[in-house]
Image (spheres, grey):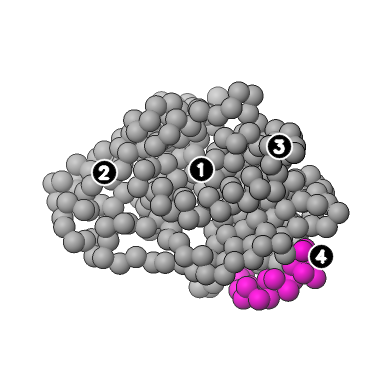
């Protein structure tokens, strides 16, 4: 327990750095920083979000997450490179949107190839953390987190629970000169409403975050340029399915595909059962594996 407490203290140091950085970024000039605000305990919902965000550091910005990134992000990046080759177009003029960007690694990988890429994220937990990694980290493996200290089940060894993960595994500032890379905060459907504005939409573990996935399909169809591509990889673990006070419509992949075809999408690539994990603890005795759908669909000219 002493070891776990020390690990929790180390995590708190990093989290406090992230919060302090964002407090300065969003500082209210009229707010008296010396005033005392009453702090209420974090809700269990917020704690779950926090634990999930810490694991996202593993998935997106650590060596340990490379296997997951290769399974989830690499097929999307390879499809972009194939569809928009540097030999045939000015990639800096190819606009690519990554909704549900999380901590920004997929969008960063796309921008590293020279494309104009924008990530979009709704969660403040993710936004604050991605801001810290992308804007404040400039050296490899500078920071240390203990992502598994809250997992008391399925540990083979006690040491597995308190092993550290270092981040970032690359220098996030290592992008091409004059690269066009950005992150936006807010609801995907509210922010993106301009017709025919993106060459490519890349979604990874995203479409099941919708209250109504039909709305996502409609938005993507609307904002894609004629001839544009929608590249998707992920399962259908609908986030609001079991929330009593939330609207949720859960469609099968077959139904989603039919709606896309009715909109006019043409499927160019479709692969079933691409196995991958999500923020997996590689040393745990229990691991969840998703059989993901991967597709590339084009909005006709």
The circle drawn on residue 264 is 4
CA–CA distance in space, label 2 to label 3: 42 Å
Q: Residue at 39% across / 48% down in the picture?
A: 65
Spatial CA span between label 1 and label 2:
20 Å
**Discs 2/3, front:** 3
- What segment is highlighted magenta in the picture? 246-266
Q: Residue at x 34, y 33 (%)?
A: 141
Horizontal and vertical percent position of residue 56:
42, 49
Label 4 to label 2, Cα distance in Å?
48 Å
Q: Secondary structure at mark 2?
A: loop
Q: In the image, which is nearer the foreground, mark 1 or mark 3?
A: 3
- Mark 3 against mark 4, which lies toward the viewer? 3
Q: CA distance from mark 3 to mark 4?
A: 29 Å
Residue 87 circle label: 3
x 67%, y 59%: residue: 296
Nearer-N-terminus badge (1/2): 1
Describe residue 31's horizontal placement relative to residue 168 as left or right: right
* Location of mark 2 (residue): 164
From the viewer's perspective, is residue 282 above or below residue 198?
Answer: below
Circle 4 — which element? loop
**Upstream in sequence: badge 3 or badge 4:** 3
User: Which quadrant of the structure image shows residue 108?
Assistant: top right
Horizontally, residue 48 falls left or right of residue 151, namely: right
Task: Report the mark closest to the observer, 4 or 2.
Answer: 4
């Amino acid at each position: 327990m002493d070891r776990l407490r020390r690990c929790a203290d180390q995590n708190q140091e990093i989290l406090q750095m992230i919060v302090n950085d964002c407090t300065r970024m969003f500082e209210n000039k009229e707010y008296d920083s010396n005033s005392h605000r009453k702090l209420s305990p974090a809700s269990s919902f917020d704690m779950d979000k926090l634990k999930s965000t810490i694991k996202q550091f593993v998935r997106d910005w650590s060596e340990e997450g490379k296997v997951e990134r290769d399974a989830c992000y690499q097929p999307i990046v390879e499809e972009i490179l194939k569809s928009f080759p540097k030999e045939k177009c000015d990639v800096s003029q190819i606009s690519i949107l990554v909704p549900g960007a999380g901590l920004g690694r997929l969008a960063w990988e796309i921008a590293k190839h020279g494309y104009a890429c924008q990530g979009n994220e709704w969660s403040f937990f993710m936004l604050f953390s991605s801001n810290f990694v992308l804007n404040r980290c400039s050296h490899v493996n500078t920071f240390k987190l203990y992502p598994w200290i809250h997992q008391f089940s399925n540990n083979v060894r006690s040491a597995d629970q308190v092993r550290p993960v270092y981040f970032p595994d690359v220098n996030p500032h290592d992008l091409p000169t004059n690269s066009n890379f950005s992150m936006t905060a807010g609801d995907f459907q509210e922010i993106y409403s301009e017709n025919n504005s993106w060459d490519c939409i890349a979604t990874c573990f995203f479409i099941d975050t919708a209250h109504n996935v039909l709305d996502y399909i409609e938005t993507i169809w609307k904002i894609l340029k004629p001839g544009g591509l929608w590249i998707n990889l992920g399962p259908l673990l609908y986030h609001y399915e079991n929330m009593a006070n939330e609207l949720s419509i859960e469609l099968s992949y077959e139904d989603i595909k039919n709606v896309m075809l009715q909109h006019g999408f043409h499927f160019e690539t479709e692969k079933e059962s691409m196995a991958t994990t999500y923020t997996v603890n590689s040393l745990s005795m229990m691991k969840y594996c998703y059989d993901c759908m991967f597709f590339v669909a084009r909005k006709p000219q």
